[in-house]
Amino acid sequence: MVLPIRQQLKYWSIAALVFLAMLWVLGSVMLPFVVGGAIAYFLDPVADRLQRLGLSRVLATAVISLVMLMVAVALVLAVIPTLIAQLTALIDAAPEILRKLQEFLIAQFPQLTDRTSTMRQTLVSIGEAIKAQGGTVAQTLIISALGVFNGVVFMVVVPVVSFYLLLDWDHMVARIDALLPREHAPVLRQLAREIDRVLAAFVRGQLSVCIVLGTFYAVALMLAGLQFGLVVGVIAGTITFIPYVGALVGGVLAIGLALVQFWGDWVAIAIVAGIFALGQFLEGNVVTPRIVGNSVGLHPLWLLFALSAFGALFGFLGLLVAVPVAAALGVLTRFAASQYMASRLYTGKDTPPPDDQEPR
């Protein structure tokens, strides 16, 4: 006897609630496993390609792990110390930057010399607060950045989890496929393939876009002579996956720093602004179309809503699972819409009309 649709919906709804409850209660515990799973998912096509070249799964996983370890060591030795140094220097320089901003505003708006002016009092209070808390803020930011993933997660848990998940990825997929309800297995496989296509196009593609644009912004800004170009480039590249936000935040930050550093040298300021204009052009016309493509099916507004909702509900872990959940819900919504379009509720007939004919 086939299980009624109402009972099936009840069981799947319970499963969804259990998943959300696990995110809520076990967020900090699940974090390294989610990160390790994301890394394994990202690298699985590389392992499959190495297997097609003749390597065993174990050897392919070992080669990938060794390469990733070498990349991580290179980043730790070459990039991260410079990044932290520039971030600390940027925060330490904040009072001086604000002082120059005050001088510029007073030169442009003489009424700010009035001590009773609300704007003047606000600027003074902000400057004093930054001067008093600058060192503390710098230490807090660095500690927080390093504390998001503690040393144990970075050094032990995430690499181990990603290694074993990558090693057994095909077996786990086959095991999950064997557990699918037999009645709905073909449809669930089709939906899973569509979700994987969307995730592969977005996650793997967008991560590549972030790396390419972050590298471009950092190198170009440092060549332009911007003092904190590496920090700005990393920030802009990291949040590029949020539509327009990466270029906007990075551009405002870079131009603001350029105004302070190159005040009067309008050519240098224009070069900094041109770097972000060129980066935005390359992202929209060259990088994203070639790497991600136009068939992702993940609308920017839907992505922003998912990031906001899951980030507010589940914190950093919510941000990590927001994109996969958004992709899955998008695929399920399109599937539900197609089922509705083919149903009697939509057509009003037992058999839906052909696509090339209008119902009479």
Image (cartoon, grey):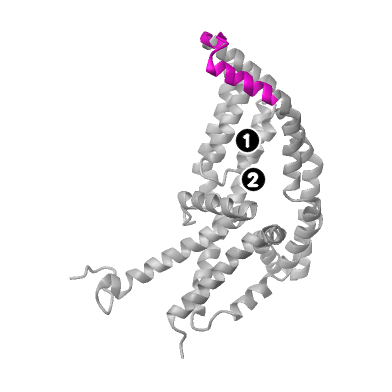
Q: Residue at x 53, y 47 (%)?
A: 288
Nearest to the observer: residue 295 or residue 126:
126
* Label 1: which secondary element: helix
As drawn, 117 above or below 24: above
Q: Residue at x 61, y 29 (%)?
A: 254
Q: What span is in magenta?
A: 110-130
Q: Quadrant of the C terminus?
A: bottom left
Which quadrant of the figure has residue 166? bottom right
Q: Which residue is labeled 2 in the image?
A: 211
Q: Which mark is residue 217?
A: 1
Q: Earlier in the sequence, mark 2 or mark 1?
A: 2
Q: Is residue 94 visible?
A: no
List x then y, in percent, for residue 51.
70, 68
Nearest to the observer: residue 19 or residue 351:
19
As drawn, 89 above or below 34: above
- Alpha carbon of mark 2 to alpha carbon of mark 1: how far? 10 Å
As drawn, 134 above or below 152: above
- The amino acid type found where label 1 is placed reads Tyr
**Circle 2 Cα neighbour tier, 10 Å, few/some/many (<14 / 14–19 / ≥20):** some
Q: Is residue 166 left or right of residue 289?
A: right
List x then y, in percent, for residue 113.
56, 9
